[in-house]
Amino acid sequence: MKKSLAGDFLVYDKSSNSYRADPEQLVRDDVEKHYWRNVARSVAKDWRLYVMLVPMILVFLFWRYFPMYELLRCFKVNDEVKPVADQFFMGFSNFKRLLAGQESMSTEFWRALRNTFLLSFYGLLFGFPMPVILALFFNEIKSNILRSVYQVLTYLPKFISTVVMTSLVTMLVKQGSLTSSMGILSQGLMHLGLVSEEVANAGLLNNPAFFRSIYTISGIWETAGYDSIVFFAAIIAISPTSYEAAQIDGAGKMAQMRYVVIPSILSTLVIMLITRIGSLLQIGYEKVLLLYNTNIYVTADVVSTFAQRYGMGQAGQAGIAAAAEMMSNVVGMLLVIGANTIARKASDVSLY
């Protein structure tokens, strides 16, 4: 027993017929002993990088972690006067009212949940491939100047504020106070016979059948260029020898994309897809709130606008709003876990 323990940390020296300390073990012991001193030296050496992390840490603290305290409202009797910690515990009553209540609130919540899923699903189905296609397109442009111009043009919509972007969309499709005549897009659809003159005059944003299409297309226009940065970075990291080997085998451009580019960026595609699936039920209320109206609640109302309407527009319903958002976040977490598990088993590539 003693020899096995000594053998774990000591090395037998034949010349002296005795055991001595293993040099590698001594190094490991020294590193472990002075671990925190080495960490302090590393921080002191690269202190500028850690200072740059401070704003992001504060953002996460104030906008991600501290608001979690308000989730207690899901389980408390709402009282605008008392702080959350002093309110009475009421269990899962708010969740029961949302899921199986006999009131109109439950109907509105299920409608908002369905709309949230559909809008996110359409954005994933049609929006996720677009950045990949753009990245492949940028990779085929040989002129660096021309590629830079195209990239800047596709990135710009991401830096336009939501208010300006929704105003542009409104001007294109809706006749109202912002425009003195019918929107250009409405006119084009009417001349092509895709919509009637009555619908075009009323405004496409006043018709529930068009909201999901408008929201999805405007979302692709806004984010496709910016999201292509990750995929383009993965593509330019591919070794040129891979292309040369494919050309020797007689592969054309399409074959190179299929057998060289796509397999090389597959891990990036899987990681980005998992993160998108995780946000499948996370639609911000800002864009929807600026585009929708009471005429199109049936297809435009989502969980975030439902929570905003009940949490801020109706007194005493903050618990209902918190419960709705919490359910959406829990479902999103389960989607991430499920997608990550499937990806790990199917392709050995996963987020964690």
Image (cartoon, grey):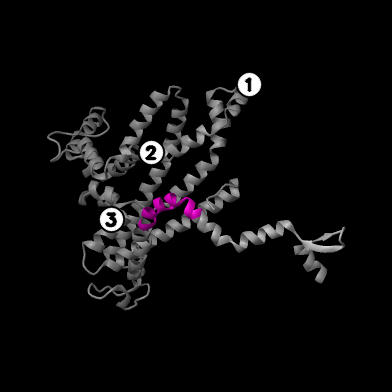
Indicate left or right for 230 with 194 as reference.
right
Q: At 51% from the left edge and 42% from the top edge, which residue is drawn? A: 268
| Picture layout, residue 323 above or below residue 276 | below
Indicate left or right for 157 with 126 as reference.
left
Residue range (magenta): 42-58
Circle 2 sits on which residue?
226
Upstream in sequence: badge 2 or badge 3:
2
Q: Amino acid at mark 3?
A: Thr
Q: Quadrant of residue 180?
A: top left
Given residues 160 and 116, the one toward you in this image is: 160
Q: Secondary structure at mark 1?
A: helix
Residue 126 coordinates in the image, percent (x, y): 40, 39
Indicate left or right for 89 with 21 as reference.
left
Q: At 14% from the left edge and 33% from the top edge, which residue is drawn? A: 181
Q: Amino acid at mark 1?
A: Ile
Say whether residue 309 is magenta: no
Given residues 201 and 247, the one toward you in this image is: 247
Dot 3 alpha-carbon crowd within 10 angstroms: few under 14, some 14 to 19, many 20 or more: many
User: On the rendered image, what quadrant is the N terminus found in?
Assistant: bottom right
Dot 2 alpha-carbon crowd within 10 angstroms: few under 14, some 14 to 19, many 20 or more: some
Circle 1 sits on which residue?
248
Circle count = 3
Circle 3 sits on which residue?
305
| Picture layout, residue 281 above or below residue 258 | below
Tell me the chief SS of the magenta region: helix
Q: Secondary structure at mark 2?
A: helix
